[in-house]
Amino acid sequence: MVMNKTIIKIGLFGIGLDTYWPQFRGLKDKLVGYQDRIRGGLERDGFSVVDAGLVDNLEKSAVAADLFVKEGVDIVFLYISTYALSSTVLPVVQKTKVPVVILNLQPVSSIDYEAFNNLPSREEKTGEWLAHCQACSAPEIASVFNRAGIDFHLVTGTLDDPEAWSEIHSWVDATYVAKLLHQSHIGLMGHYYSGMLDVYSDYTQLSGVFGNYFELIEIDELKSLRDDATDKDVEDMLVEFRNTFDVSPECSETELRRAAKTSVALHKMVEKHNLGGIAYYYEGQPGSEHEDIITSVIAGNTLLTANHVPVAGEYEVKNVMAMKIMDALGAGGSFSEFYAMDFDDDVVMLGHDGPGHATIAEGKVQLVPLIVYHGKPGQGLSIQMSVKNGPVTLLSVCQNREGKVKLLVAEGESIPGPILNIGNTNSRYRFCMGAKTFINTWAKSGPSHHCAIGVGHVASKLEKLAAILDVEFHRVC
């Protein structure tokens, strides 16, 4: 997914001690230059950076705090440029009240001891040491934040350390996802699949954590929008089908047009309510117009999912949130459940009857007819695909017996091999702990039977998102 980077603002301030500047010539300019490098690295990624400069006394601390509040920053990076008094740090963070990440970044990986010791005076040596003593303040700031009840995070390394910058980017990405979730309207249409007790959810608790709004939508509204679909609307959607899917010759023109007409209505419903995701399930009376609609949604829902409006079937509200998170990270987020285990190859098979996430498919998504939807009424078109071979991440949004939200995560690998050609999404996954241990550990961690699968290993970003949202994070592997 291409991020809308304008939705977040990043606060940045450095800390130092004004007592040093007249004592050590050139030190302040050197430290400001280091901070400029950090700002430049963030700005090159296209994010808006509010730089409060080098805070080296209480007066500048108050100015920085007011600036961050006025600009509405979403996260603050606190750069330790040299030793600084914690009294100049605490007020900024207390007043801003957003996640804070301490950057304990030395200018180089190690001091050039020979060059250092050859400096002509002890004063020059001390000034050079102070330009490298970022670690000196880290315990002091951590102690104060701990005692003040302020959650904080540390990134330690050098100014050019790829690992450190990966951590910084992960914090920015997690902040972006949290902000996007807060702005999202999620549509809920229909009702739960009766008897799937694990998918029943507390909307209030989920909104309290993610900050999103749930829009309750009647299927009659979808019918009305479908009734208004024009022939041109349908023809345009059929073109979209053929551009996106590998349409099986077995698909009849009647079924294609039925699915296209419903897809037109789904897209209009999303536009009308500004939806960022949908969870749905419905059956309708046999032979009714509502049954005709609900049995023709898979193709349209797959198009929406590929275009950053993830759709979860079986009214799996928690999982549409998981899919939204994975999509926001650019990882996809395909609706999945456990299908089978291959003990000979030590893999777990996951899939679902749709929708899938077409942008993370191995090859083109197939559109195929089914004469029966297993466990559901009716027949119609379905999609068949596998997730791209390579690293993957599984995410489940869980609620425990107290209703608290948890992010459950596992990293594994999508691997090639035989799959079940039954008109569903279906892939083979290998996990470092082996199939038996993985399924036992995952199941005992409290998920529902659905999860969102995305490409790439993004557990580190999800852990940071959990920290920002103040929810439990549990990584299985």
Image: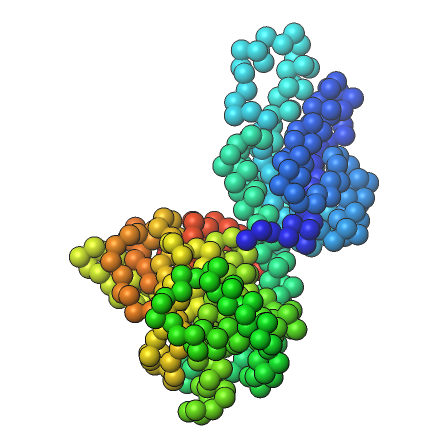
The front one of 37 and 415 is 415
Residue 39 visible at all: yes
Task: Name which residue lies at 33% across and 63% down.
Answer: 426
Q: Position of residue 322 (x, y in %)?
A: 49, 64
Residue 192 visible at all: no
Task: Name which residue lies at 59% across and 83% down.
Answer: 227
Number of marks drawn: 0
Q: Position of residue 276 (x, y in %)?
A: 59, 66
Task: Name which residue lies at 47% across and 60% down.
Answer: 244
Which residue reaches farthest left? 344
The front one of 51 and 347 is 347
Q: Position of residue 339 (x, y in %)?
A: 30, 67
Give residue 87's quadrant in the image.
top right
* Image: 327 above or below 153: below
Indicate left or right for 33 with 103 as reference: right
Q: Position of residue 294 (x, y in %)?
A: 47, 81
The front one of 400 and 85 is 400
* Image: 289 above or below 107: below
Task: Name which residue lies at 52% across and 25% down.
Answer: 109
The front one of 93 and 201 is 201
Give residue 222's quadrant in the image.
bottom right
Display coloring: rainbow
